[in-house]
């Protein structure tokens, strides 16, 4: 079940001489509306050459987000958690504690102004991260995200372990990826995740990998640098209301 996206170049390095990407890990839970407001402001500053590129790792309180392709029928339990219109591509997804969300604000003009290659690079980042934990993540041509086969559940069963939803403005990306580390998987039942009814969701811990979020973060940074280039630790962003 190979993917056409496997044929795209996974490396998405910045042009020579570019500054490192700021790398920030947020503490505690980050409100969704505050996160989106910050991302939009930072992406605009990057486009103007007034700020460095940024990867911002957060956890959110339990919530659902609706992408630009979301269908109302896929919101199964509208009163279960707050629902936010996100502006990113894709359909409904869940965010909550135990899930690592990485908001990726990169200037694609400094790299490759090619959205398909950018998505392929994000998938490659997730697949490389999973490989560090001896998990084989796979792409699918008809489904964005990263999937794992579940022979323990049946020969043809596979679950989604990571989602991708991006937005690009003036060739600067924002929103990003989410990797299920140890979220409450029952919370996904309030939606049809990413519009896919035929498959389930899983996490690192659900797959028997007893890993902590800091351990995942360290691996994600290492594998990010292998695809996108150097990073540098930076201070936490100042959100509205802080």
Image: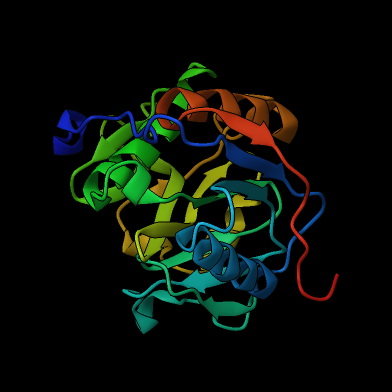
Residue 73 screen position, x and y as percent: 36, 81
Residue 174 screen position, x and y as percent: 48, 59
Q: Is residue 151 above or below residue 158?
A: above
Q: Nearer the viewer, residue 111 or 102?
A: 111
Residue 196 screen position, x and y as percent: 32, 59
Q: Is residue 68 above or below residue 143?
A: below
**In which quadrant of the rendered image does the N terminus lie?**
top left
Residue 67 screen position, x and y as percent: 40, 71
Q: Is residue 40 above or below residue 187?
A: below
Q: Is residue 118 left or right of residue 20?
A: left
Residue at 28%, 37% (x, y): give it: 139
Q: Nearer the viewer, residue 241 or 113?
A: 113
Residue at 58%, 62% (x, y): give it: 42
Looking at the image, can residue 208 be seen?
Answer: no
Q: Count of labels shown?
A: 0
Q: Which quadrant holds residue 233?
A: top right
Q: Is residue 224 above or below residue 188?
A: above
Q: How is the model colour-coded?
A: rainbow
Looking at the image, can residue 236 be seen?
Answer: yes
**In which quadrant of the rendered image does the C terminus lie?**
bottom right
Q: Nearer the viewer, residue 233 or 142?
A: 233
Residue at 75%, 49% (x, y): give it: 26
Residue at 46%, 44% (x, y): give it: 162
Q: Is residue 15 left or right of residue 32?
A: left
């Amino acid at each position: 079940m190979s993917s056409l996206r496997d044929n795209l170049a996974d490396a998405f390095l910045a042009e020579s001489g570019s500054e490192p990407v700021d790398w920030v890990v947020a503490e505690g839970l980050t409100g969704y509306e505050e996160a989106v407001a910050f991302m939009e402001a930072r992406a605009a500053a990057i486009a103007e050459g007034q700020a460095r590129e940024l990867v911002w790792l957060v956890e959110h309180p339990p919530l659902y987000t609706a992408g630009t392709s979301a269908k109302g029928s896929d919101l199964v339990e509208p009163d279960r958690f707050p629902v936010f219109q996100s502006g990113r591509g894709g359909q409904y997804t869940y965010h909550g504690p135990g899930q690592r969300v990485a908001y990726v604000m990169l200037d694609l003009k400094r790299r490759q102004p090619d959205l398909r290659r950018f998505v392929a690079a994000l998938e490659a980042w997730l697949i490389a991260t999973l490989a560090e934990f001896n998990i084989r993540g796979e792409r699918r041509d008809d489904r964005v995200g990263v999937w794992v086969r579940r022979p323990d559940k049946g020969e043809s069963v596979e679950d989604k372990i990571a989602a991708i939803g991006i937005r690009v403005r003036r060739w600067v990306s924002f929103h990003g990826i989410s990797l299920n580390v140890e979220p409450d998987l029952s919370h996904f039942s309030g939606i049809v995740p990413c519009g896919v009814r035929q498959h389930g969701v899983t996490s690192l811990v659900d797959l028997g990998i007893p890993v902590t979020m800091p351990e995942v973060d360290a691996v994600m940074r290492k594998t990010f640098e292998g695809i996108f280039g150097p990073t540098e630790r930076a201070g936490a962003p100042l959100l509205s209301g802080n």
